[in-house]
Image (spheres, grey):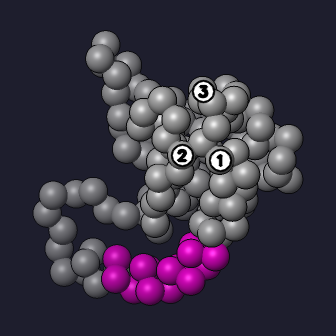
Amino acid sequence: MENLIEIKNDYNSLDKLKDFLNKESIYRCSKTYDIWEMRTDDNGQMKQCIVLKKNGMHAIKAFFVNENTVKINHIIPNKMMNTYFGKSVKAHRNMIEIAAGGIKEVLLKGSQKTAFSELEQLVFKAS
């Protein structure tokens, strides 16, 4: 689950957007390094993103793809839960990992979609 959202010039930096989301929502919003995609800048440093966290299993990650466009993705913010329930990025997976991944996706899909759309509406307020 991901979406691209064009936002107002008033919120065209991570700090400004984070401040806005902290004011507008009851959820915890923080600026952190992007450990989910391991995005790096030109100097090889890890890029930052905003994490709007609903609970230990549901959050969205927001980062700028250009000056006024934010890309948001559903993530599992808890590192331990992400290990068990997150998407596997291994190049080669065995049959048990493939089957378990399919089962996890089916079981979590509804609640993840509900949480994503709820958190997505908060980011839309900045557009």
Indicate yes or no whether the magenta region holds residue 125.
no
Amino acid type indicated by mark 2 = Glu
Prevalent SS, magenta region: helix
Element marked by disc 1: loop
Q: Is residue 71 above or below residue 58?
A: above
Q: Where is residue 94 in the image (x, y as percent from the top left)?
A: 17, 73
Q: Distance between the Cα atoms at labels 1 and 3?
A: 13 Å
Q: Which residue does the image show at 34% across and 22% down from the upper left?
A: 41
Q: Position of residue 122 (x, y in %)?
A: 72, 55
Q: In this view, does 104 lie to the left or right of 52?
A: left
What is the magenta range? Answer: 101-114
Q: Which label sits on residue 127? A: 1
Q: Is residue 84 left or right of residue 98?
A: right
For label 2, the residue is 6
- Label located before the other in sequence (1 or 3): 3
- Label located before the other in sequence (3 or 2): 2
Circles 1, 2 touching at the beta carbon (< 8 Å): yes
Amino acid type indicated by mark 1 = Ser
Q: Which label sits on residue 13? A: 3
4 or 9: nearer the viewer: 9
Q: Which residue does the image show at 47% across and 52% down from the upper left?
A: 4
